[in-house]
Image (spheres, rainbow, N blue to C red):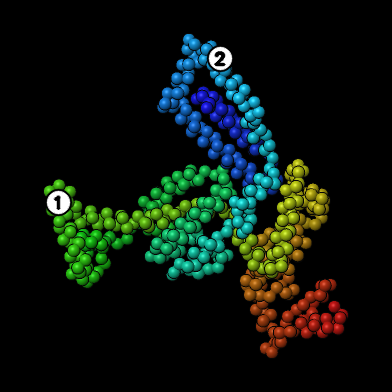
């Protein structure tokens, strides 16, 4: 068994090597999202080990059993050389007894700091397939819990991602125990996801700052959706039953309650307790009991308000992931099953290529687009194609397209097609160059007004061949039947 001083030396050495390992990790340049996440998880593990070793050192320095003091006296007393040779003899006897005992130096553990496939694969186990390695949130289970709540607004998953932090829109009377369980499940997921995506973030400090801000707003009654109880109409003390500790709103209900068996039994128990309280001088007034009951009733509401407040703070930190999740869900809704499978295969190939790319970071101060060779395109080509000109499409959610080519191409892509579908307008060539919502609606109204009443569907639908020629449905089917297209 190691002595107290030797254990202290070993713990100090491990802490020094862990600190150096953290520096070595931050000196690395992660090239992918996965490598960056692995770096943060590795540093977080090192910090946890430093904290644990520091606690062990604190126990040794406290020296409650006196072993450290006894050892210090032994090696610094009059017989210090005798103590030295005794310890040397113990070491020699141990190596003589175990000559082939392998010793692994501590520095070997921290020599290889580069990310490996095994470490990256182990990181994937922390996330579900829907989370895509921490890029997106997976709130499907929480959304199902929300949909099972009664008297709340029903919405699809995409709408829920945009509205799940709007707690002030939920009526206060609908915030019951089931709603509290839903909040707890949402908070548990967001806190766990935040620990996995941002392991270096200090959740304790975030909660402490949020608690101070919450207490101020709760006391002032300015918390959205939770007005202060004192700001409401004050309850009447003459309608408060001190025996049953219950507040009533109407005289008729209160008078009917006074004749119930439950009240009579509670009143008899109260009378017995009051006699004992009078003897001790601890009798409480009706107003004091009423205040305690109202404070006790407000405690669950305060806990729910605190949970909502923390969820909103977590959502602010995870804003980028939430926006990416909404965009991903919206995009995937426009894909077929085959396209989703192809997309997964493409993402896997791109991920493998990016993981195997060991080239240095390319110097690109002008932030030019990357060409087919992995290098920024020439500046003259950037100006030739007009990539510095930005085009905004309101139908695509004010998405910005750089360059005329990308702008013309986007009218047949999924984002614009989904926007037109949401407006209830067919995405035909007649709406090419139309980027405003009101302009598209006005043109669609004119088109519908100019159509003959008996227009057939096959004359309205348009089809396009491989060369870009547009035909109505009847002409397209005739030419295809004849083998001309």
Mark 2 — residue? 85
Q: Is residue 12 visible?
A: no
Q: Name the quadrant containing residue 386.
A: bottom right
At numbered mark 1, what does the secondary structure look like: helix, strand or loop?
Answer: helix
List x then y, in percent, for residue 108.
Answer: 66, 33
For discs 2 and 1, the disc positioned in front in the rendered view: 2
**Which is nearer the eye, 373 or 142?**
142
Q: Earlier in the sequence, mark 2 or mark 1?
A: 2
Q: Please determine whether, in this image, residue 409 is positioned above or below residue 199.
A: below
Q: Tell me, for residue 21, which label it has, or none.
A: none
Looking at the image, residue 264 sits to the left or right of residue 7; the answer is left
The crowding category of the residue bearing disc 2, from other C-alpha atoms within 10 Å (few below 14, some 14 to 19, many at least 20), is few
Q: Tell me, for residue 276, which label it has, or none.
A: 1
What residue occupies the far top of the structure in this picture? 78
Contact between labelled residues 1 and 2, with CB atoms less than 8 Å apart: no
Instruction: Please tell me which residue is depicted at 61% across the width and 41% down the height of the picture.
Output: 42
At numbered mark 2, what does the secondary structure look like: helix, strand or loop?
Answer: helix
What residue occupies the far front of the structure in this picture? 97
Instruction: Please tell me which residue is depicted at 19% across the width and 68% down the height of the picture.
Output: 261
List x then y, in percent, for residue 235.
Answer: 26, 61
């Amino acid at each position: 068994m190691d002595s107290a001083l030797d254990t202290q030396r070993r713990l100090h050495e491990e802490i020094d090597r862990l600190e150096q390992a953290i520096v070595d990790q931050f000196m690395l340049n992660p090239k992918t999202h996965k490598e960056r996440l692995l770096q943060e998880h590795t540093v977080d593990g090192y910090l946890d080990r430093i904290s644990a070793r520091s606690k062990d050192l604190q126990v040794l320095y406290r020296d409650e059993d006196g072993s450290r003091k006894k050892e210090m006296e032994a090696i610094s007393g009059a017989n210090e050389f005798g103590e030295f040779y005794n310890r040397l003899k113990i070491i020699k006897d141990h190596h003589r007894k175990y000559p082939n005992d392998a010793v692994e130096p501590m520095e070997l553990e921290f020599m290889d700091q580069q990310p490996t496939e095994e470490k990256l694969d182990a990181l994937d186990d922390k996330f579900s397939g829907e989370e895509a390695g921490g890029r997106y949130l997976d709130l499907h289970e929480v959304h199902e819990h929300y949909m099972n709540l009664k008297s709340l607004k029903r919405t699809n998953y995409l709408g829920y991602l945009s509205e799940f932090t709007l707690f002030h829109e939920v009526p206060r009377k609908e915030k019951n125990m089931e709603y509290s369980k839903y909040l707890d499940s949402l908070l548990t997921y967001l806190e766990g996801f935040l620990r996995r995506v941002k392991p270096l973030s200090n959740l304790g400090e975030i909660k402490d700052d949020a608690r101070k801000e919450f207490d101020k707003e709760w006391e002032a009654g300015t918390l959205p959706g939770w007005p202060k109880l004192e700001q409401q109409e004050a309850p009447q003390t003459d309608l408060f039953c001190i025996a049953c500790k219950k507040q009533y709103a109407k005289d008729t209900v209160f008078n009917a309650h006074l004749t119930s068996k439950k009240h009579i039994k509670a009143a008899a128990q109260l009378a017995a307790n009051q006699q004992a309280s009078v003897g001790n001088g601890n009798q409480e007034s009706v107003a004091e009991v009423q205040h305690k009951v109202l404070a006790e009733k407000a405690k669950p509401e305060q806990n729910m308000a605190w949970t909502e407040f923390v969820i909103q703070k977590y959502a602010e930190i995870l804003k980028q992931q939430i926006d990416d999740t909404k965009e991903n869900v919206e995009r995937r809704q426009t894909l077929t099953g085959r396209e989703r499978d192809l997309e997964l295969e493409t993402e896997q190939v791109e991920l493998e290529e990016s993981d195997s790319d060991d080239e240095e970071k390319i110097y690109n101060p002008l932030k030019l687009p990357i060409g087919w060779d992995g290098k920024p395109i020439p500046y003259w080509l950037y100006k030739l194609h007009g990539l510095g000109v930005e085009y905004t499409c309101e139908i695509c959610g004010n998405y910005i397209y750089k360059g005329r080519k990308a702008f013309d191409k986007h009218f047949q892509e999924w984002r614009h097609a989904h926007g037109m579908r949401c407006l209830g307008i067919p995405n035909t060539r007649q709406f090419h160059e139309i980027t405003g919502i009101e302009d598209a609606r006005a043109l669609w109204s004119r088109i519908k007004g100019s159509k003959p009443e008996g227009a057939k569907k096959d004359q309205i639908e348009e089809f396009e061949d491989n060369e870009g020629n547009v035909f109505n449905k009847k002409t397209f089917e005739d030419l295809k039947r004849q083998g001309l297209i």
